[in-house]
Amino acid sequence: MTAHPLPSKRFVLTLLALALVLVCWPWLLTDPRLYCQILAMAFLYGALALAWNIYALTGALSLGHAAFFGLGAYGSALLDHYGHWPVWLAMLVGSLAGTAYGALWSLGFRRLRGAYFALATLAAMEIPKVMIDNWDSLTFGSLGMVGIANLPSVGLGGREWIIGREPDGQYYLLLAFVALLSWIHRQAIHSRWGWAIRAIRENETTAAAIGIDVFRTRMQAMLVSSSLTALCGAVYAHMVGLIEPGLVFSLHLSALPLILTMFGGRCHSLGPVLGALLLYPVDQLVFHPWLPAGHLALYGLVIVITVFFLPQGIATWLQQRLRHAWH
């Protein structure tokens, strides 16, 4: 296998310019609240897609990652509600519920491949959902949990910045969060471990023949993916302030990272994020206002056309176009 080419200086400068725009643009608007809310959610969905893609790089298709998202959300919310834990600590510890469930998946589904694995993950998503939905004395059942603590206030520039409550604070928090996960995702792709998981994706038998421990590598990928997905769920719970089983364990949340990753580019470190930053705001600001009853059909049509003509995703296509323009 050959080493992945390093990005050119101009490409790096382009990324830095884009990051600078994302940091500074809210200060240029008179009332950026709506746009900050939409982009903050796009960042969260981008982080979710990055977490999902770490396991998808092994060649396995998971349709049940909402299980980890929901367990992270409920784990953190329960620690906050009953134990009054500090929010940051509740988020980290609560996410371990998703990690533990990911370990069970790795052990229970170790012999499943292809469509059988995908269907098993879809069915496994329902197990925690049904348990939480019926455990009224602990989780309040289908009514959900409300009054979940906001993220704590942070002093910045001489004023108290309530990052978990104000839209601009949520925006910058999620921008930092998705930047962290983008770095983790890039390291996963281009590290020696990343080559191992991609070798498993290409040919599992050959990967085992050259000395790669297939089960251990798959399990490591699942643990990383489930942990980060659960952390996304915990962040969501404390940002929104309320959760319910039908929302955080929904099929929508399981399919969304697949859609965003395929649209943006699954083999590019910024692909899932770019997919989220393009699809979600366009749907909320353009498709939904113009076509309330059929915006999902238009949304789906855009995805199908893009995947058909750009099978490597938007990010890879843009990178190739930029390199061609610079040279």
Image (cartoon, rainbow, N blue to C red):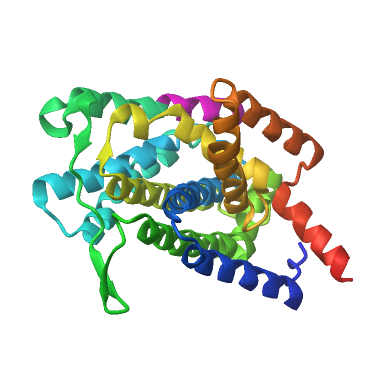
Magenta span: 114-123
Would residue 217 be seen by someone viewing this image from the given angle? yes
Q: Position of residue 60 (x, y in %)?
A: 58, 39
- Residue at x-position 54% and y-position 25%: 292
Count of all numbered marks drawn on residues in the image: 0
Q: Nearer the viewer, residue 241 or 198?
A: 241
- Residue at x-position 83% and y-position 59%: 321
**Residue at the front extreme, as displayed:** 30
Q: Position of residue 30 (x, y in %)?
A: 46, 60
- Residue at x-position 28% and y-position 23%: 130
In-image side of 87 versus 324 (left or right): left
138 lies above or below 207: above
Q: Position of residue 97 (x, y in %)?
A: 29, 45
In-image side of 298 versus 155 (left or right): right
Res. 126 image quadrant: top left
173 lies above or below 143: below
Res. 182 image quadrant: bottom right
Would residue 204 be seen by someone viewing this image from the given angle? no
Q: Nearer the viewer, residue 228 or 10?
A: 10
Q: Quadrant of the C terminus?
A: bottom right
- Residue at x-position 62% and y-position 47%: 278
In-image side of 31 versus 298 (left or right): left
Q: Position of residue 313 (x, y in %)?
A: 72, 46
Residue 238: within the magenta?
Answer: no
Res. 204 image quadrant: top right
Question: Does the magenta stretch mainly form a helix, a strand or a loop?
Answer: helix
Q: Quadrant of the N terminus?
A: bottom right
113 lies above or below 177: above
